Amino acid sequence: MAIMITDECINCGACEPECPNTAIYEGGVEWTWGGGTTLKEVTLEDGTVLDANEKQEPVSDEFYYIVTAKCTECNGFHEEPQCAAVCPVDCCVDDPDHQETEEELLAKKAMMHGE
């Protein structure tokens, strides 16, 4: 399952530099698939192909957020999600709406990092 940031976030930013996939962004900041990955283009589930550097709409305008499609819970990098490990208010939690197996998370990591 991916990690999400709850609305209890205090916008301290401690989580952002810890993410090996660059899946965490400050509220209001556009994100890209390519940031922190080796991706040049991305094929979405509906078959749409995007330039990996094309800016995407922010998930939240109010507080830091995690792009679910880029979150691997740090599988293949660390033993635990680093955002949750450093969060001073424990607002980086499992996202019950996005459950993934370890195999799926590792496949996502391999896809994003050209492995």
Image (spheres, grey):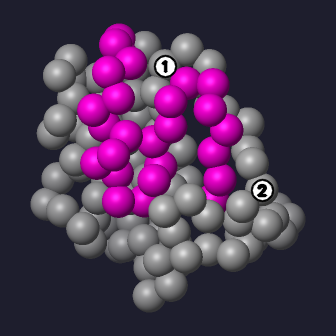
Residue 103 seen from this side? yes
Place of residue 85 in the rendered image (x, y in percent of width and height, measured from the top left): 15, 39
Q: Do the CB atoms of the residues marked 1 and 2 lie less than 8 Å apart?
A: no
Residues in magenta, as a range? 8-33
Residue 97 visible, this angle: no
Question: Residue at image x 35%, y 29%?
Answer: 13
Mark number, residue 54? 2
Of the image marks 1 and 2, the number of the one nearer the N terminus:
2
Against 53, residue 18 (above or below) is above
Q: Where 42 sits versus 63, above or below?
A: below
Task: Please tell me in which quadrant of the rendered image residue 21 appears.
Answer: bottom left
Q: What's the magenta bit mostly, secondary-structure-wise?
A: loop
Disc on res. 63:
1
Magenta span contains residue 89: no
User: Hey, what amino acid is under mark 1?
Assistant: Phe
Check disc 2 and report its element: helix, strand or loop.
loop
What is the x, y in percent for residue 47?
A: 83, 69
Quarter where residue 102 is shown: bottom left
Asked whether 32 falls inside the magenta stretch, the response is yes
Q: Position of residue 100 (x, y in %)?
A: 41, 57
Dot 2 amino acid type: Glu
Residue 7 circle label = none
Q: How far across and how far down the image is residue 67, in percent? A: 53, 44
Instruction: Using the image as rendered, state which of residue 24 and residue 73 is in the foreground.
Output: 24
Q: CA gap, disc 1 to disc 2?
A: 22 Å
